[in-house]
């Protein structure tokens, strides 16, 4: 028996709440991209047009791959602009040597989006950091190209090949001065060389709450403590903690890769465990492994534990008594 | 005094300025009222009047002998036109009593009564509260008399009055504290006597400094009662959060405030209790905020139970633009209505009229963990939602579904616009259903 005064309002029935915070996923993605720009510009400054071309190719291929998968999976094609594919393409490029053949950039970027992200179900479903999946593939498939390094400003000079600070230390016991590491005037991937710039934008990233501060902080603290611990154990051929912090991909990885929301833990305790794990694994690889660098593998390794970490670090419900 | 608070929570935009400090206006008697029988959590009521009966204002029209219930009184003088199914704010179709009103009130209760509650035994006070049909008016609508009857052996030491009004938009409690603070304070003392508590605390959010000042002025000579400012943060007014903020006591999962020796009551309920116990007036009127961006004159109204939303909307000047949602309650926990014909209930604290807004797209969860970091109950909303979508009810329970207070914080902060609290509700209902079926 409905009321006679039924009016012609077109009211929406929806579950509460009827207010939403203004921040959305696309905004988060583009804010991260904006923060990656200074690092990108530094890379182009040090490694010139070669770097710029590789960055643009990587982003373009990432977006095209994303688009193809969206089309095949009959998803909303506008999602290609949600920013996540751009981040993956950009991050991948930042972890590549400046002179890697373009064809390999294309392969890496396609693998990053295709295998790293879309086969898992697209945005939000991937277990591993997609950019690092692409990079890991390249490392396995093209080990020589992936470890051929050039000096900054190589495009102006004659001698072009160089070692990375970590490689130099591991294989030739050359210690790169801290100032050089901070400024980025060393050999390395396109985006990893200037620790100072990464540190600055990384802190802004944390202040804007675009990443969980617990992850980079626990990585950094763990690297320092673990290195000191190895010193105490009398491990030979060991650098000082600051050297490990500011060389290689540690800063870039700690602030921009490990903190990838999708592939990192969602609980406060979990984030700390994740960060400590990365710190320990990266140092084990760097000190005892065959490779001078270990950031990529340590993040991927810990990514695999995230579902487990989440499950066992569930916060205690309000009012629940400690068992 | 330093403002206290709980952990986590959010700071949504308040929108209170729309109706803030607008003086209470008594809404005229509408031509008819539709009074839903279901006014509270608990046993369903049975009508004690029939079609064609003339009823007086304040006359009992439905009741139940069950313990967890509160009788229902006519809010007007008039003739019962029908007893049947109508839309109510909580249901598409439920039993209501429709009454055609007369212009003048004839009261079923004595006027100008002045009882002295100090001479009453706690039991007598509770009985008066029960007979007056008082339920929690903050929104939960639990029968007050039941709340004030703690089980054998449970000692209540503190009564907290909830003047937080943490829902955005709503200003009914705020205005009540400004206009009849004495009643609210007396109501608190009555509750304290009813449950034999030695201490009374009035918790008010700091966004209502004038209310804090007014109540503080009033209690300055009281020995056992004080005002505790609490931070303006959502959901500060949730019972568990308020007790935690004010006393530092945490109500365990699945338990009631009395487990930690506390009774919490809304300020509006407190005033109604004063009316019931001292003046002998049953609960048939309440303060309702009508507000929103699509209503001409947002205001704080004194409304008779059963008054149709449409009548109140007209009284507030009507709509100013195309309306998308009419919500019972505040924007965080309120329930959308599909018609404005529904009648106000005892727990209707607000009517929110929202104009057309840009539709938002739902993205996949990106594990940003905002919901985890903001949930006042320390649940893992995103996991519960994912489990619910996958129909993994055990998983949903593991991540805390049953402890959800449905405050909406998770959905509010979700950058992917996932209706998390909706999925948690789905899981919660299903888990309870399964448990019942298993006989637990």
Image: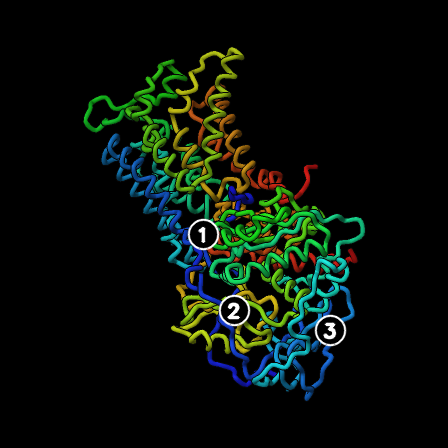
In percent of width and height, residue A140 lies at 44, 32
> Does label 1 lie on the same chain as label 2?
no
Is label 2 in a helix, a strand or a loop? Answer: loop
Please name whichever residue, B105 or B310, is drawn nearer the observer in this view of the structure: B105
- Residue of label 1: B415
Give the residue displayed 40% in from the left and 39% down from the top.
A207
- How far is mark 1 from mark 3, CA to CA? 46 Å
Distance from the alpha carbon under mark 2 to that under mark 1? 21 Å
Q: Is residue B320 left or right of residue B149?
A: left
Q: Are marks 1 and 3 in contact (CB under 8 Å)?
A: no
Q: Sequence order check: which comes first, mark 1 or mark 3?
A: 3
As drawn, which residue projects farthest toward the left?
A156
Separation of disc 3 and disc 2 at Cα? 31 Å
Q: Which label lies toward us, 3 or 2?
A: 3
Q: Mark 3 falls on what kind of element?
A: strand
Chain letter for mark 1, please.
B
Please state the chain letter of the residue tagged with numbered disc 2 in the rendered image.
A
Towards the viewer: B395 or B85:
B85
Q: Which mark is residue A13?
A: 2
């Amino acid at each position: 028996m409905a009321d006679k005064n039924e009016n012609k309002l077109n009211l929406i029935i929806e579950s509460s709440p009827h207010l939403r915070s203004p921040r959305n996923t696309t905004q988060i993605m583009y804010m991260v991209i904006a923060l990656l720009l200074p690092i990108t510009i530094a890379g182009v400054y040090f490694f010139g047009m070669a770097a710029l071309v590789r960055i643009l190719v990587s982003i373009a291929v990432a977006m095209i791959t994303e688009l193809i998968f969206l089309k095949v999976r009959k998803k909303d094609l506008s999602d290609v602009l949600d920013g996540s594919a751009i981040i993956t393409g950009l991050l991948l490029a930042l972890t590549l040597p400046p002179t890697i053949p373009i064809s390999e950039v294309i392969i890496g970027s396609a693998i990053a989006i295709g295998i790293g992200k879309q086969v898992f179900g697209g945005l939000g479903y991937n277990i591993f950091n997609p950019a690092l999946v692409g990079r890991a593939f390249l490392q396995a498939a093209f080990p020589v190209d992936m470890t051929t390094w050039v000096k900054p400003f190589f495009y102006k000079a004659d001698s072009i090949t160089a070692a990375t600070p970590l490689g130099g230390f591991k294989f030739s016991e050359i210690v790169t001065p801290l100032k050089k590491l901070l400024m980025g005037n060393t050999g390395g991937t396109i985006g990893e060389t200037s620790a100072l710039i990464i540190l600055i934008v990384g802190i802004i990233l944390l202040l804007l709450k675009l990443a969980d501060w617990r992850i980079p902080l626990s990585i950094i603290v763990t690297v320092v403590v673990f290195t000191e611990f190895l010193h105490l154990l009398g491990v030979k051929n060991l650098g000082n903690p600051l050297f490990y912090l500011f060389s290689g991909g540690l800063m870039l990885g700690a602030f921009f890769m490990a903190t990838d929301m999708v592939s990192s833990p969602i609980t406060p305790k979990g984030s700390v465990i994740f960060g400590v794990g990365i710190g320990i694994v990266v140092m084990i690889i760097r000190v005892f492994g065959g490779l001078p660098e270990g950031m990529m593998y340590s993040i991927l390794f810990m990514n695999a534990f995230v579902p487990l970490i989440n499950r066992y670090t569930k916060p205690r419900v309000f009012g629940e008594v400690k068992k | 005094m330093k403002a206290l608070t709980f952990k986590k929570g959010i700071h949504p935009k308040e929108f209170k300025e729309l109706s803030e400090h607008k003086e209470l206006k008594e809404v005229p008697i509408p031509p008819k009222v539709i009074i839903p029988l279901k006014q509270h959590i608990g046993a369903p009521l049975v009508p004690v009047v029939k079609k064609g009966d003339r009823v007086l204002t304040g006359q009992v029209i439905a009741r139940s002998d069950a313990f967890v219930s509160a009788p229902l009184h006519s809010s007007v003088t008039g003739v019962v036109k029908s007893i049947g199914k109508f839309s109510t704010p909580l249901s598409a179709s439920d039993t209501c009593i429709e009454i055609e009103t007369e212009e003048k009130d004839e009261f079923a209760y004595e006027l100008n009564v002045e009882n002295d509650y100090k001479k009453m035994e706690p039991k007598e006070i509770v009985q008066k509260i029960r007979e007056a049909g008082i339920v929690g008016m903050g929104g939960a609508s639990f029968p007050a008399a039941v709340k004030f009857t703690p089980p054998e052996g449970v000692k209540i030491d503190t009564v907290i009055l909830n003047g937080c009004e943490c829902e955005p938009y709503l200003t009914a409690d705020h205005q009540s504290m400004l206009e009849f603070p004495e009643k609210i304070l007396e109501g608190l003392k009555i509750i304290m006597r009813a449950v034999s508590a030695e201490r009374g605390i009035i918790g008010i959010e700091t966004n209502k400094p004038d209310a804090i000042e007014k109540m503080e002025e009033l209690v300055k000579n009281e020995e056992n009662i004080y005002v505790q400012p609490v931070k303006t943060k959502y959901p500060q007014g949730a019972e568990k959060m308020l007790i935690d903020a004010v006393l530092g006591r945490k109500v365990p999962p699945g338990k009631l405030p009395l487990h930690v020796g506390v009774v919490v009551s809304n300020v509006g309920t407190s005033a109604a209790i004063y009316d019931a116990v001292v003046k002998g007036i049953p609960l048939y009127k309440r303060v309702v905020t009508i507000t929103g961006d699509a209503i001409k004159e947002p205001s704080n109204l004194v409304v008779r139970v059963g008054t149709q939303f449409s009548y109140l909307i007209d009284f507030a000047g009507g709509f100013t633009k195309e309306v998308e949602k009419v919500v019972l309650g505040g924007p965080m926990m309120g329930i959308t209505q599909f018609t404005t014909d529904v009648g106000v209930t005892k727990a209707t604290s607000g009517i929110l009229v929202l104009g057309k807004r840009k539709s938002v797209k739902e993205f996949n969860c990106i594990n940003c963990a905002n919901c985890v970091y903001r949930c006042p109950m320390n649940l893992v909303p995103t996991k519960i939602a994912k489990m619910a979508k996958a129909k993994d009810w055990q998983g949903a329970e593991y991540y805390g579904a049953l402890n959800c207070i449905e405050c909406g914080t998770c959905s509010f902060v979700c950058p992917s616009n996932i209706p998390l609290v909706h999925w948690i509700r789905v899981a919660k209902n299903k888990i309870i259903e399964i448990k019942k079926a298993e006989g637990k």
